[in-house]
Image (spheres, rainbow, N blue to C red):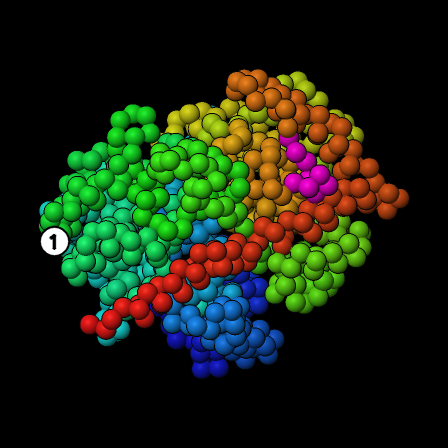
Amino acid sequence: MSLAPPPDRIRRLNELAYDLSWAWNAKAREVFRHLDYPLWRSTAHNPVRMLRLISRERVEEAAKDTSFLTLYDTAIQNLDRARMAVSTWWSQQVPDLSNCSIAYFSAEFALHQSLPIYAGGLGVLAGDHCKEASDVGLPLIGVGFMYPQGYFHQSVSSEGWQVELYERLNWEDAPVEHALKPDGRPCIVEVPLGDKTVRVSVWLVRLGRVKLYLLDTGLQENAPWDRELSARLYGGDSETRLRQEVVLGVGGVRALRMLGHDPTVWHMNEGHTAFLVIERMRESLERGESFESALEQVRRTTVFTTHTPVAAGHDAFAFHLVENYLAGLWRSIRGHRNAFLNLGHYDSGGGPLFNMTALALRTSGGVNTVSRLHRQVTSKMWAPIWPGKADPDRPVRAVTNGIHISTWIAPAMSNLFERYLGREWEERHEEPGFWDAILSIPDEELWAVRQSLRSFLFAFMRERVRQRWMEERLGPARVVAGGTLLDPASLTVGFARRFTAYKRAELIFRDPARLARILTAPRRPVQIVFAGKAHPADDQGKHLLQRVYRNAVDHAFGGRIAFVDDYDLHVAHFLVQGCDVWLNNPRKPLEACGTSGIKASVNGVINLSVGDGWWAEGYTGSNGWLIDGGVTSNDAAVDAADAESLYRLLEEQIVPAFYDRDEHGVPKRWLRIVKEAIRTVAPQFSARRMVKEYAEGMYIPMARRHLQDKRAQPAI
Ligand SMILES: *Cc1c(COP(=O)(O)O)cnc(C)c1O
């Protein structure tokens, strides 16, 4: 922390800025909004940066401003209450496990746009998991990477080609501090990488009750190529990736040990993190245990979540590379090298490789997928891991993803819930019956909120284009593509996700003439807002994006299509709150879960989706629309049938429901669906339901058994 100390009366202001729980705590955010609103906006809501830039006079003025002090005192009280964990769901549920902790490893965490260490859905899930853990008192410790160049910023050229910009993080602006060992000194661990050693420093991010540790190889004493190891997320080739994964898995375990933590349960979020089991087994072997016993102990305390039904999404490396980079570990556990390599041995068609998912599946006692449909696909896809076991007996369970409601809900919507459901709505949001009261919200009020959220989105898009127009001297076509011709009162469809083939961003353009008729209908127009990045190495995805972009500037669509660049958490908030319809049309069953449609639904943005991922469980017949072409033969036939289904839904149901108004201009039928979406989705697809399912299904039973095992062991 390098910020100047604030005046005495608001002495803990810096502490408030350095606890990211402000990201989901409206009261804490109000402190910073009130402190200096223009600065709050120009820093894209980054309190640390704000406090670095703010004038001393303003801070001193605030220290005497009673309305500011009321906000400040409330926020500090909330922070203390949140951290003390006097009485939480966890402490009440499992008082016997009060000394346990759960390590949660992930290659990315999406917590707030000011900490750019995420790419997409996987990171959002990890971030929401941590936030919810803090809320319910689950003793989680996160472990990930501090990428000083993060994931790239996206800009789109006038030809529609994605340009990637890597920005160096200004450390002074990030809500991170050095993690300290129990003796108060900085934590630096050593990770053997081949015959060399990489030194890794550790940063701490405070998230209410939860701590997140981020590894960083950017130390002067490392070789230049090792320094860059943690520079970027998913930036390098396969070998770089392997080296990163060794640092994350092995370095993460060592960092926790050095910081004085002894987690009871270890959760691996996706296969990138799976080398942590190798390090934990090495620890047991060095204590003199047998390979089998070391493996068994690890299995009994490890949870693994797999995230993708796409084969290429699972990391696999040539054996000689793994052998080389783990050489420093083999040395101390001579004799077990082949047994270790066998744990990752898997042939998914192109010859055997060391497969990180196979390693994780073989070493985890609790394995889960992120939706029920994804469980079926995963069980089939990895069947050789469980020889002789039929599908129902394969040890894979489904824990469908959920979103952290306080993070994703629009403030205007939250106020409405507070008024009609009660102030305790955030506390009770996972009780299904609780949401029935949503029906008591007057349609006029709900509609007014929906309209205002749409107008926030448009103001945001316009402001972005205005900035770019001035700073980058954009041409007129790019100004149109940025959404300046969109109409704030018209039906708005949102489509925002990574550009990759299976998500079929182009599906809606299959019949351009028909789409043009829908979009440019004189009395009942429709408009579409696209956003999303293509992976830097995915040229096919970039071509897709380019074709979508060209449609946005095609005169035939009347300027009713926009492309918002640089999709991130900030953009996502405006989109999932401000559109009317959220479109999702992947090729089934390749979307493991998807969460943006959940964020949209809880804000009253109606989901229009293929029955894949969460929507296969969430769609009730009255809370949104199901795209279903009814065809499963070849890809071309599926696309044609799904496009037909999509057009018909738009023409026959969605457009009429949106534009049929009562005498006050309120779309009654539309709002019935809006209410039904909120009522059914918010409790069932919340991170609270999800985190409790992880706890009750895996963390708690594992922790209890572990304690029993320990008690049963004779004291040495
Ligand atoms: C929620 C979110 C995602 C994941 O949503 P999907 O529905 O899985 O595409 C990706 N990126 C950002 C920025 C998000 O906020």
Quadrant showing the C terminus: bottom left
Image coords of residue 374 (percent x, y)? 49, 38
Can the viewer see residue 456?
no
The amino acid type found where label 1 is placed reads Ser
Judge from the rendering whether residue 249 lies leftward or rightward of residue 593; answer left or right. left
Judge from the rendering whether residue 32 lies leftward or rightward of residue 706; answer left or right. right
Q: Say above or below: 338 vs 519.
A: below
Image coords of residue 118 (percent x, y)? 41, 47
Q: Residue at x 39, y 32 (%)?
A: 311
Name the residue that disc number 1 marks. 332
Q: In the image as oriented, which residue stretches furthest toward the right? A: 663
Judge from the rendering whether residue 445 lies leftward or rightward of residue 472; answer left or right. right
In the rendered image, residue 151 lying in the magenta stretch gets the answer: no
Q: Nearer the viewer, residue 407 or 613?
A: 613
Q: Residue at x 26, y 26 (%)?
A: 351
Residue stretch rendered in magenta on the structure: 619-627
In the picture, residue 519 is in which quadrant? top right
Query: Is the distance from the Cβ of mark 1 to the nearest ligand 1 atom less than 8 Å?
Result: no
Q: Residue at x 56, y 35 (%)?
A: 612
Image coords of residue 198 (percent x, y)? 17, 52
Image coords of residue 10 (percent x, y)? 48, 78
Q: Nearer the viewer, residue 383 or 443?
A: 383
Can the viewer see residue 310?
yes
Q: Nearer the viewer, residue 662 or 646?
A: 646
Quadrant showing the N terminus: bottom left
| Number of marks in picture | 1
